[in-house]
Image (spheres, rainbow, N blue to C red):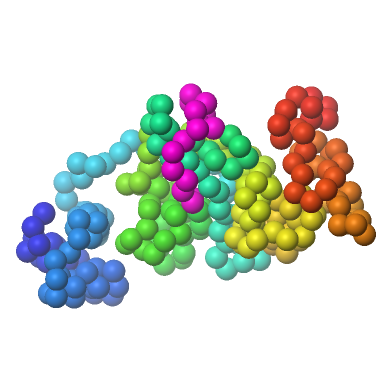
Amino acid sequence: MTQDEAKTKLMTILHRDPKHDFASSMFKQSHRKALSEKQLYWVERLYNEIVGGAPSATTRQVFKLDCQGLVDLLAKAKENLKFPKYRVSIRVDCERCNTTGFLAGGQRCHKCGTDGQHDAMVVFKLASDRSRHPGSINITDDGSYGTNKYYGNLRGGIFYPGRDATPGFEQLIADISADPVGYAQRYGRVTGSCSFCGQTLTDPRSTAVGYGPVCAGNWGLPYGKKEVAVDGTVDHECPDCGADVGSHGVICSCEINPETRAGE
């Protein structure tokens, strides 16, 4: 698409939707300097969404997934938070098979078992009431609109991959949806940051659980029954198997060997 074609399409978009801030911003910029390749992508995408036209050559396959776990988790948090966010960290572009693999918790590529090459933040958040698909789940890196990484959207049990979703990303979403709390706990224990608010975990019990008491309340999650000892160690039940977890930052053995979990 040429710069002149982009201007024409932006004018058409703004004729249909005069209050579209992003299109208006790009249209003003187009009179000062050339639009970037990423901006040209967004012009084409917005034009097809708002005005209509031939399907884009970059249209991707969609995937039917059981994502009820993520839906329920975010819905519960929405009762207490205006803009709930759920964070995980992944490794993308596996060096062996080019498949996305989960990072937090010490896991590797789910397809071939190899460590990935690049760390990336993935954030799940509910679309606002003013969005094109209110109540759906947007998956991004939490960057600014137009310059962020966009991995896709979850709605009605369907995952619609975005421009930055790598092959195999749908399986990653399915795995996280099957146990979102467990993934959040592993993320918190390994990274030292809360999956829900992003803050550093400093309290021994919070480090052991993987999130703090405030987020536990906001997201409707258990926080444990036992207290922190005077010496700073934690007499705490592992949320996965019920075993006692000892000192600050220690991960229960069931994280390393799931066969040791109680009842298994």
Q: Residue at x 63, y 43 (%)?
A: 183
Q: Is residue 54 left or right of residue 105?
A: left
Q: Quadrant of the C terminus?
A: top right
Residue 10 spot, x, y in % from top left: 17, 66
Q: Quadrant of residue 95?
A: top left
Looking at this view, name the residue that lies furthest to the right: 230
Q: Is residue 194 left or right of residue 4?
A: right
- Taking the image as drawn, is residue 58 in sight? yes
Looking at this view, name the residue that lies furthest to the front: 231
- Taking the image as drawn, is residue 157 in sight? no
> Residue 237, relative to residue 196: is it above or below?
above
Q: Residue at x 32, y 46 (%)?
A: 163
Residue 43 spot, x, y in % from top left: 21, 59
Q: Quadrant of residue 180?
A: top right
> Residue 261, relative to residue 234: is it above or below?
above
Q: Is residue 252 magenta?
A: no
Residue 184 spot, x, y in % from top left: 64, 48
Q: Nearer the viewer, residue 109 or 87?
A: 109
Residue 155 spot, x, y in % from top left: 46, 47
Q: Is residue 242 left or right of residue 151?
A: right
Q: Residue at x 46, y 48 (%)?
A: 120
> Residue 159, relative to residue 130: is it above or below?
above
Q: Nearer the viewer, residue 64 or 206?
A: 206
| Residue segment shown in magenta | 108-122
Q: Is residue 121 magenta?
A: yes
Q: Quadrant of the N terminus?
A: bottom left
